[in-house]
Image (cartoon, helix red, strand yellow):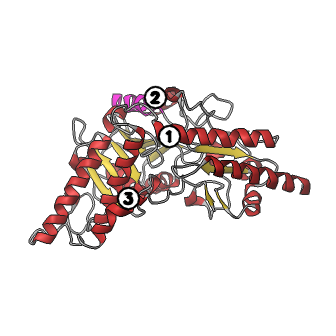
Amino acid sequence: MIYLDHHATTPLDPDVLAAMLPMLTDHFANAGSVTHEAGRAVAEQLDRARHELASLMGAADDELVITSGATESNNLALFGACLHPRQKRRKIVSLVSEHKAVLDPLGRLELMGFEVVLLPVNDRTSETPGRVDLERLRSAIDDNTAIVSVMLANNEIGTIQPLREIAELCHARGSILHSDATQAVGRMPVNVDFLDVDLLSFSAHKFYGPKGVGGLYVRSRGRRVKLQGQIVGGGQQQNLRAGTLNSAGLVGMTTSLKKCYQLNTWRDRPTEVGEEQTRIAGLRNRLYAALQAGLSQIQLNGPKLQAPERPGSWTRLAGNLNLCFYPIEGQSLMLEIPGLAMSSGSACTSADPRPSHVLEAIGLSVEESRSSLRFGIGRFNTEHEIDAVAELLVAAAHKLRKLL
C-alpha cells in the first residue's frame, strides 16, 4: 500500500513508539498516586513532558489541557467558553468550511439559544480559495460576540487562515478567538503568542504521534479565558478536564512534536515552513505536475501550489493536494486503485453520502465535489512512491473515461 492520507491520520513515528513503551511497561503507575514513589516518578515525567510541549508552542505549562484529541478539545473550548456562568454574550462567529468537530457543537449551541453566524469563504475564482474575507469578518463581530472559531489550516483543501489578523479583529471587540489547529500543529510552526489566540485545539495523531491524545491551549496570561469543565469527576487539570492522564500518550505527543520542530528547525526560525515541509511540498508539486502531464481536465481545488523555495508566501499546507477529476467520480477512481490510500474528503465524514461542504463552500458543484480526491503527503513518502501513484492514477482515469 502507498499511503497518501496523512490528513486523516499519520503513521506512528518509530522514535515516538520507543519513547512511549517504557510508559506502558515500567512506568505504568497513575500520576495521581502521589502517595507512593511509583506514582510520583510518573508525575515528574509527565510534568517534564507537559513543560516541553508547552514551550514548543509558546505556552505556559498550566495553559495546556491534555484531552483525548481535537474533537474533545473543540467541545471543551466552545461549550466551556459559551456556557461559563460569567459569559453574558450570546453570539458565535465561525466559517462554513470548518470541520464538523466545530460545526456540530455550534449547532448544539444554537439550539440552546445562541446566535451562530457562519461566514462564507473565498470561492475558487479568488487568489486564496477558502480564506475568510477580513472585512466581512470585521462586520460580523460585535459587542455581543462571545467567541470566534476559525481553523488555522483546512483539512480538505489546506487553506491557511490569517490568524494573527483575525485575532486583532476579535480582541478589538473583546471576543475570544478559538482555532481548531488540528491540521496545522506539526505541519507548520504554531506559536500561540505569535498567533495571539485564546484557545487552540490539536491532536497528536496528525503529526506522527499516537491516537487518543491531544490538547487544548487555554490562555491564562493577560486575557485570561474562563471555561466551564465538560468532563467532571476528580478535579484533575484545574477542574477543566477530569480523568486519569494518558501517560504514554502525553509522552508520545511531546516526542512527536519535538521531532517535527527538530526536522524543520522551527525553534530557530518560527515563521518558516522548514526543511521537512519543503521536501513534502516538493513531492506534492511533483505529483501534481505528473498528473497534469498525463491527464487533461483535472482541476486544482484550493489555493495555488507555491514553489518549495518560497515558503514565506505559502497559503496552503505543504502536503495537501485536492483535485477534481470530473466527470470521473472520485469513489470510482479509488476503487480502481485499491493499493493506494487517499480520500474523497474528511475522514470524519467518510460515511456521509453528501458531497464535501468545504468544496461546495468554494463554489464546486455537487458533481465536481464527488469527482474530487484529497491527497495528503507526509514524512515517509518517497519520490518513487509519488511517481508510482501518478502512473496508477493516469492509467485508471483513462480507463474510466473510456467507459463514460
Q: Secondary structure at mark 3?
A: helix
**Which residue is the site of mark 1?**
277
Disc assigned to residue 138? 2
- The main secondary structure of the magenta stretch is helix
Q: Dot 1, crowdedness within 10 Å: few (<14), some or many (≥20)? A: many
> How far separated are the C-alphas under marks 3 and 1?
19 Å
How many marks the image carries: the answer is 3
- Camera-side residue of 30 and 354: 30
* Residue at horizontal 42 percent and vertical 60 percent from the top: 14
160 shown above or below 54: above
249 shown above or below 160: below
Is 284 displayed left or right of 95 in the figure? right
Q: Earlier in the sequence, mark 1 or mark 2?
A: 2
* Residue at horizontal 75 percent and vertical 50 percent from the top: 391
Q: Secondary structure at mark 1?
A: helix
> How far separated are the C-alphas under marks 1 and 2?
32 Å
> How far separated are the C-alphas under marks 3 and 2?
42 Å
In the rendered structure, which segment of residues is drawn in magenta? 162-173
Can residue 86 be seen here? The reply is no
